[in-house]
Amino acid sequence: MRDPLHPALEPAAPARRPRALAGARIQRVTPLLDERGDESGEHSLVALVDDREVEVRYDDGSGALALEAGDEVRELTRSEAKDLARALLVHQQSVPWDDGVLGRVLLSLNEAIFPVSLDGFTARSVSDLGEVILLAGASGPLAVDVTLDTSRGTLTLVLPRTGGGTRKRAPTTQEAHDLSRALQHQLRREPRTEKKRLLSLALEAVRRFASH
């Protein structure tokens, strides 16, 4: 029986990870060179956060943005993308030129910030590629592919980029909830085939992601 005079200590709430780009001030945006000394298509965005340098890599080909955090390289979170977009808008007003790079980075940031609606997603085909399950489909008029890495349990959305090409990123929690409902609806209508088995595996991964 619990002693009312000595109540059990409540577990401390997990500490929230500080936003790595809160209050960031852009210092420079420079192209990266490949082994031959040519521009590689990647750019380095260096910002100051509390007098500490933070680097973000931008890939012009895919539109991907990755944060260099110590030995870790990871995608930006939505809040980090918002912080970086604010910093870039301020920086853009302070430089007397525009070589197009900042505009393309801001476009990629907007694509990372605003979620897509997946409640109408339908997988037109499902492929078993070994360690990866590929759901090729669409949500309304938007072409969307979903990949599940079965060895790591990671989900990736493959979305069209404004201006052509595709971009890859993890789904947001809301997108995962919408995708979960859409897959459940499709599963109810699928006959017992290999496609249904693969869809079930994808649904389990989406549910785990949505519950995090």
Image (cartoon, rainbow, N blue to C red):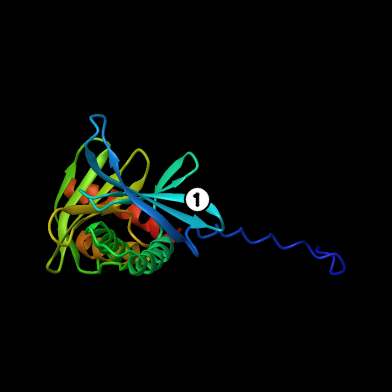
**Which residue appears at 52% of the width and 57% of the height?**
49
- Quadrant of the rendered image containing residue 138: bottom left
**Farthest top residue?**
36
For residue 189, side relative to residue 131 (left or right):
left
Q: Position of residue 2 (x, y in %)?
A: 80, 64
Q: Position of residue 87 (x, y in %)?
A: 41, 65
- Quadrant of the rendered image containing residue 110: bottom left
**Which residue appears at 50% of the width and 42% of the height?**
70
- Quadrant of the rendered image containing residue 191: bottom left
Q: Nearer the viewer, residue 54 or 177?
A: 54
Above or below, 154 against 139 in this view is: above
Tell me the amino acid under the disc marked 1: Glu
The reply to whether residue 144 is visible in this rendering is yes
Q: Position of residue 171 (x, y in %)?
A: 33, 58
For residue 115, side relative to residue 23 (left or right):
left
Q: Position of residue 73 (x, y in %)?
A: 41, 43
The reply to whether residue 208 is visible in this rendering is no
For residue 68, side relative to residue 161 (left or right):
right
- Number of callouts: 1
For residue 2, side relative to residue 23 (left or right):
right
**Farthest front residue?**
96
Q: Secondary structure at mark 1?
A: strand
Which quadrant would the N terminus be assigned to in this image?
bottom right
Residue marked by disc 1:
53
Q: Nearer the viewer, residue 183 or 72?
A: 72
Q: Residues within 10 Å of mark 1 (few under 14, many from 20)?
A: few
Above or below, 153 against 14 in this view is: above
